[in-house]
Image (cartoon, rainbow, N blue to C red):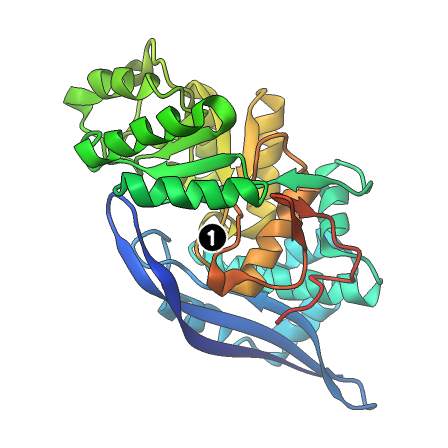
Amino acid sequence: MNLRLELQRSERQLESPLVNAGAAWDRRTLTRLLWHEDDGSGARVSGWGEASPLPGYSPDTDADVERALGSLETERLVALAAASSAAAVLDVVAGVLPRSSPAARFGLETVLLDRLARATNRPLWQLLAELAGTGSAPREVALCALVPSADPSRVASLVEQQLNAGVRVFKLKIGPERLRPEQEATLEALRGRFGRAVALRLDANGSLRRSELAATLKRLARFEPELLEEPLAGLTPRDLAGSPCPLALDESLQELSDADRERRIESLPASVVVLKPTALGGFAACLQLAAVARRLGRDTIVSHALEGPIGWSACAHLALALASPRAAGLWPLAHQRCASPGVEAGRLLASTAPGLGDPA
C-alpha cells in the first residue's frame, strides 16, 4: 500500500480581531493534514487532521509542525497505518513525535483516528469515549461563547444575540495587571442587563499583578464568575488562600511533565482544568488530564485555540466524549464553522457520521 501524509497550509482572516492579556490575532495560519493511501484500487484520502499552533500562546510553532510531520519516512507511515485500535494509535503517535511538538501530535492523532473511525463506520467521539470510560450513549454538551470585554454596549448586543441562539455561558478576557475600567464596566453592564440569566467566565492569561491579586479577586467576586482562568503567572497555593473566585487551570499546564501536571492540579484549589488539545499535546494528553481531574474531583472544559474547521471538529468530538457538565469553550467562530458535529440551541450535538464527519 502506498501511503502519504500531505500538509496544506492556508491563511484565514478572523471575522473580528481577538485579544488576550498578552497577544492579539486578526489572522490565523492553519495547517490541514490529509492521509493519502492507494491499495491498488485507486488513491484516496482516508483521514483528515489539523496541526495549527497559535502564535503567542502555543509552546510550538508552524515551523516545528513542518519539521515534525513534513518528512515522515515511509516506514513510519506504515507503522502508523498498522495501528488497529484507538489506544494503539495514541501509543504509536507518542512513539513517533516528541512532547515538544504538541500541535503535530494532535494533528497526527486526529488524522489517524479519523481514518480508523471511518474504516469502522463510527463517529470519532465514540472511540474517544471508550478510551475515557464514559460510555458510547449519545449526548449533548452546552457551549460557552467568547465575547469582547472592552466595549459594554457592543458586548451586551452580542450576548443578547447569542442568548437567543441558546448560549448561556460567556467568557471574557481581563487584564493585563488588573481589572481594567472598561472591563469592569462591561461586567457591570452584563450583570445589570442579564442578571443571573448568564454565567460569566473570566480569563486573565496569567497577567494579574501578585501585589494586587487579593484586591482584584475581591472586585471580580462582585460579578459572581463561574470561574477565573489563570489569574497569575507562577501561581502558588498561598496566592489563592481565601480566594472568593473559583479557579481554572489552562496554559500553565502546557510545558509540564505528566507528573508535574498532576501535582499542579492537586496542589492548587482549582475546580476546573481547561483542555486545549493543540497546546497540550493532543487527545492522549487531554484524556490523561481528564482522568487526573476526575480522580481529584475536578471538572474539565474542552476549548479551542482558534483552529480551523477540522481542529474545531476534533475538539468538539473530545468534548462529546468527555461529556463534562460544564459548557465547552467551543461556540464556533466564523472561520471554524463546519457541518459536523452539529450545533443547535446553544448545544453541541453528538454526530453519528463516521470519523470527524464532513471535513470541509
Amino acid tagged 1: Arg
**Residue 213 can be seen in this image:** yes
Residue at the image position 43 percent from the left and 30 percent from the top? 200
Categorize mark 1 by other alpha carbons within 10 Å: few (<14), some (14-19), many (20+).
Answer: some
Q: In which quadrant is the C terminus drawn?
A: bottom right
Q: Quadrant of residue 52?
A: bottom left
Residue 57 lies, with reference to residue 44, above or below; the image says: above
Q: Is residue 277 left or right of residue 316?
A: left
Residue 317 lies, with reference to residue 337, above or below; the image says: above
Residue at the image position 42 percent from the left and 38 percent from the top? 171
Q: Spot the residue most to the top.
A: 242
Quick one: 51 or 218, which is closer to the camera? 218
Residue at the image position 61 percent from the left and 50 percent from the top? 316
Residue 288 lies, with reference to residue 187, above or below; the image says: below
Residue 158 lies, with reference to residue 271, above or below; the image says: below
> Tag 1's secondary structure?
loop
Residue 327: % across, % down: 57, 36
Q: Quadrant of residue 164?
A: top right
Quick one: 297 or 151, which is closer to the camera? 151
Q: Is residue 358 left or right of residue 337?
A: right
Q: Is residue 107 left or right of residue 350?
A: left
Residue at the image position 80 percent from the left and 38 percent from the top? 135
Q: Spot the residue most to the left.
A: 211
Q: In which quadrant is the N terminus drawn?
A: bottom right
Residue 119: % across, % down: 82, 67
- For disc 1, the marked residue is 99
